[in-house]
Image (spheres, rainbow, N blue to C red):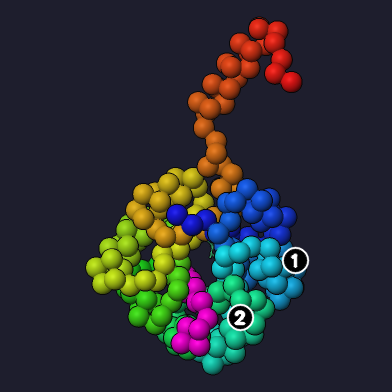
Amino acid sequence: MKFFVDTAEVDQIAELNDLGMVDGVTTNPSLIMKSGRDILEVTKEIAAMVDGPVSAEVVATEADDMIAEGRKLAQIAENIAVKVPLTWAGLKACKTLSDEGNMVNVTLCFSANQALLAAKAGATFISPFIGRLDDINLDGMELIADIRQIYDNYGYDTQILAASIRTVNHAYQSAMIGADVMTAPPKVIKQMAEHVLTDKGLEAFMADWAKTGQKIL
Ligand code: E4P
């Protein structure tokens, strides 16, 4: 499973990138706002740092304007994936931008039918938002499973990018279902290393080691 980091915080991306945990990065207008950085500048910096796709989102709502913004964002670097929302205009922009050879990430996907349309419009990635469905008491994981089934039924090569991941359980379930990629905040990726029995076991080993009076170095 590929890991994308869902942030525009360069230092946090760098830390995970050094560990080989970063196959790509996703940003959105809210994450750019939180970073306090200029979108073109920070996206360029991130794209130079990581080898994989870096999603940069358009903010226009009409197809022609989305296409113009997408072309500009795509010029930042070769590894930019233009992110467009799953609206009818967004699907039009997806088709044009992908026909022009750009990677396109179709975002704000909340239904399997939307994901089917994105695949037909040539999306490189489809981003179903798990956490936001859970927020309204719907099952985000069911959506990932449905999209997996539909894409496999018909052999679409659009990659399922499990997004809006808020917990380690979301990450685990997305991997079990077979999402191609997950994008998660750095905090969640780090939490995946944690287990209460690891902490307890380490504590016991340290206590016993202290009793030996030995040193390795
Ligand atoms: C990623 O592409 C999405 O923009 C992001 O995962 C949304 O996450 P949120 O629902 O926690 O804001």
- Camera-side residue of 64 and 181: 181
Residue under label 1: 36
Q: Amino acid at mark 1?
A: Gly
Q: How many marks?
A: 2
**Residue visible at 43% across and 70% down in the picture:** 126
**Residue visible at 32% across and 58% down in the picture:** 145
For the view shown, which residue lies furthest in the front direction?
217
Does the magenta segment cover residue 107? yes
Residue under label 2: 74
Q: Is residue 66 left or right of residue 143?
A: right
**Residue visible at 71% across and 15% down in the picture:** 215
**Upstream in the sequence, badge 2 or badge 1?**
1
Q: Which residues are magenta?
A: 98-108
**Residue visible at 43% across and 77% down in the picture:** 123
Percent x, y for residue 133?
Answer: 42, 59
Where does the N terminus fall, quadrant-wise?
bottom left
The numbered dot on residue 28 is: none
Q: Alpha-carbon distance for marks 2 and 1?
A: 21 Å
Find numbered disc 2 in the image and state the secondary structure of the residue it sits on: helix
